[in-house]
Image (cartoon, helix red, strand yellow):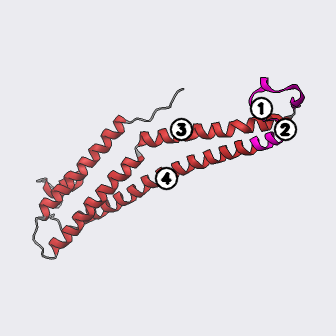
């Protein structure tokens, strides 16, 4: 955005004849349009991937818990696995490696999945993935509309291309400033429990 303002408005600019139809100006609008399109999709995909991974992890953890509960319940050892002091003497399980493994598998995968989901949710909130995707999509629409308006002006439709580009540059600078403020307000920190 700063390079664009320099190109069009600074007195000692590199291209003194630069206008809205200059190849560098057109390249800037095109490259920003492509960037915001890619960035919007990237942030939305990251959000979706983290949500799916968290839900999948919870499903696997819950599945392990259910399978172990069924196996231990079939052998009437589920109360013994959940409450060691509650186990009646006739049903006291032999302390074998298989029983210990099933007991651990009853709770550990679900707990680990829940912790990973909490961490990924915290990361998504701190990085503001959904908000970034919306902001980038909005800027994509701003640049797309400006590109279409510039093409209309080039074809003879009335309008002020310099003013349009000026407002487009201002919108880009405001978006960059918003991004910087958001990064300063949301530094990523390790969650300590």
Q: Which residue is mark 2?
A: 98
Q: Residue drawn 13% across and 55% down?
A: 9
Quickly name the residue at label 4. Answer: 48
Q: Residue at x 25, y 52 (%)?
A: 172
User: Helix, strand, or loop for circle 3?
Assistant: helix
Q: Earlier in the sequence, mark 1 or mark 2?
A: 1
Residue bearing mark 3: 118
Using the image as rendered, state which of residue 3 and residue 141 is in the foreground: 141
Q: Is residue 16 visible?
A: no
Q: Earlier in the sequence, mark 4 or mark 1?
A: 4
Task: State which mark lies toward you, 1 or 2.
Answer: 1
Q: Are marks 4 and 3 in contact (CB under 8 Å)?
A: no
Report the Cα–Cα distance between label 4 and label 3. 15 Å
Q: Secondary structure at mark 4?
A: helix
Q: Quadrant of residue 42?
A: bottom left
Residue wearing tag 1: 79
The span from disc 3 to disc 2 (Cα, nearest Å) is 30 Å
Q: Earlier in the sequence, mark 3 or mark 2?
A: 2
- Tag in front: 4 or 2: 2
- Disc 2 on helix, strand or loop? helix
């Amino acid at each position: 955005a700063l390079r664009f303002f320099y190109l069009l408005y600074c007195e000692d600019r590199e291209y003194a004849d630069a206008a809205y139809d200059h190849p560098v100006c057109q390249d800037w609008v095109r490259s920003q349009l492509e960037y915001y399109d890619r960035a919007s999709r990237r942030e939305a995909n990251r959000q979706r991937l983290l949500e799916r991974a968290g839900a999948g992890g919870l499903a696997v953890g819950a599945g392990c818990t259910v399978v172990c509960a069924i196996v231990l319940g079939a052998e009437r050892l589920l109360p013994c696995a959940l409450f060691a002091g509650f186990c009646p003497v006739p049903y006291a399980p032999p302390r074998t490696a298989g029983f210990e493994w099933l007991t651990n598998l009853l709770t550990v995968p679900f707990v680990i999945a829940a912790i990973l989901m909490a961490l990924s949710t915290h990361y998504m909130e701190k990085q503001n993935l959904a908000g970034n995707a919306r902001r980038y999509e909005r800027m994509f629409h701003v640049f797309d509309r400006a590109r279409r308006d510039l093409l209309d002006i080039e074809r003879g439709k009335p309008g002020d291309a310099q003013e349009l580009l000026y407002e487009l540059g201002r919108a880009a600078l405001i978006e960059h400033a918003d991004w910087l403020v958001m990064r300063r307000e949301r530094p990523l920190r390790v969650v300590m429990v």
